[in-house]
Amino acid sequence: MSIQSQVTNKVKIVQTSIMSFVVTKSSPPMLVAPSKPTPAGDIQLTPTDKSRLLVPFTSFHIFEHPIHEPANIIRHSLSQTLIHYYPIAGRLAFGATKGDNNKDVYVSCTGQGVAFVSATASCTLQELRFLHTPLAIPLADLAVRYRGCCGPTDPLLMMQVTEFTCGGYVVAVTWNHGITDAFGLAQFLQAVGEIARGLPSPSVVPVRHDDSLPDIPQLISAVLKRSPAAFTTSTKRVDFAYCDFTIPWSFIDRIKEEFKSRHIGSSARPCTTFQVVTAVIWQCRTRAINADPGVPAPLMFTANVRKFVGAKDGYYGNCVFSQLVEATSGRVANSAIVDVVRLIKDAKERIAENVAEVREMELDDELMGALCGYNMLGVSSWGGIGLDCIDFGGGRPARLVANVEKLSAPACFPCLPHSRTDHDGANVVAFCVTEEHVDKFLAELARLQ
């Protein structure tokens, strides 16, 4: 079967509608290759890359201001950008690891390309409510998907550009997390935008392999080593409710002031918006699921650690660390919110130390069980990493929406950049409770003043 057929079989040309709005994928998925020949060879993946291999994520970038023929412009710019980011146009490959019979995985720089689809929608972005809930169009109609898990022969990145009747457009990017993290994706999409605006080459010289990087301890690797069977069981798909909400600035500012007043005269720095918002989600969710007060309710948040490990400028491979915050369900649910903020802030300040230790994380049996269950919460902030700086010629995005195709654990994306609700508060997209608990979760959030 040809690569073209493989891609086409994964994403069918469909017309679907909700509230009479129709999305028409006007072309089958095509492969966009680098516009010039690129170097061949293999790119070794780091342990951090491998810990996220085959996990798909999607980012929806909503652009309010029109540009002429956005799908054509972006497709052409994508082809030129892949000259510089040619590993993204490659495929995963497997080979024997030296000294044993296990298989290692790497990126083969084949230049085959990334998948691309153009589409049109029969409504305006205003009628779509800029992808705020309730959704007027299924997110799946606006993106090319892997249908669950990235396969070893799949493109490492897939893109759909959907044009709306108002002239605005949505760029949906689905990628294999093993090739890049969200910071690296932002760098890549900024480069596509720069070329779309007429620059001859990206302003940042990309680096995919950096042999000076130390091994970064990974929580998922520790879990797999301790209990592969438990992790496999936990990775079954769970249908979490899709939640899209905003934490009011009035509440965030009040908690910041309260935190500051509690630490007057101390060396503690002010808490951040991310820390307040994450604390709120953690507490409201813990209350909503009503877990036993004595059981662990761990929080895991992802941090970009390029500055801590001395990554080269332009490095776009995975360079993230999963910081764990341990607390019981009762402590999270019943503490003052400033005390929950403090737990997160203290953990964040230990990241540099934890990364520098480069040792395997220690997990006891009770914590292991919690990490593989419903009580844990994973948090990934896409704010402040450049995803709000993408510009294909009509200005930056009006909104960014994060999405995960397959979920096995509760997750949320706080403080999404360039939300149209920025004047109201910090926007959050979350998949952290099942339908059974969604009403209670939203009720807890509604109590915030």
Image (cartoon, helix red, strand yellow):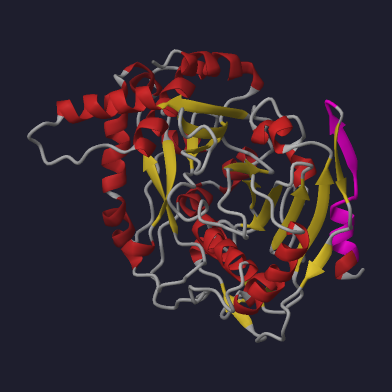
Q: Is residue 302 left or right of residue 156?
A: left
Q: Is residue 212 left or right of residue 165?
A: left
Residue 352 visible somewhere in the drawing? yes
Q: Residue 226, how many percent across, how many down? A: 49, 48
- Disc count in the image? 0
Q: Is residue 14 magenta?
A: yes
Q: Residue 436, how many percent across, how many down? A: 63, 17
The residue that appears at 58% across and 29% down in the rendered structure is 244
Q: Residue 167, how many percent across, how many down? A: 74, 47
Which quadrant of the structure image shows residue 278?
Answer: top left
The residue that appears at 76% across and 45% down in the rendered structure is 142
Quarter placement of the N terminus: bottom right
Residue 179 visible somewhere in the drawing? no
Of residues 392 and 108, the one drawn nearer to the viewer in this rendering: 392
The residue that appears at 64% across and 48% down in the rendered structure is 65
Q: Residue furthest left?
A: 265
Which quadrant of the structure image shows residue 158?
Answer: bottom right
Q: Is residue 55 magenta?
A: no
Of residues 229 and 295, the one drawn nearer to the viewer in this rendering: 295
Q: Is residue 230 above or below residue 239?
A: below
The residue that appears at 41% across and 72% down in the rendered structure is 313
Q: Residue 72, how many percent across, how many down? A: 77, 63
Quarter placement of the C terminus: top left
Q: Which residues are magenta?
A: 5-19
Q: Is residue 208 above or below residue 408?
A: below
Q: Is residue 307 above or below residue 232?
A: below
Of residues 80 and 338, the one drawn nearer to the viewer in this rendering: 80
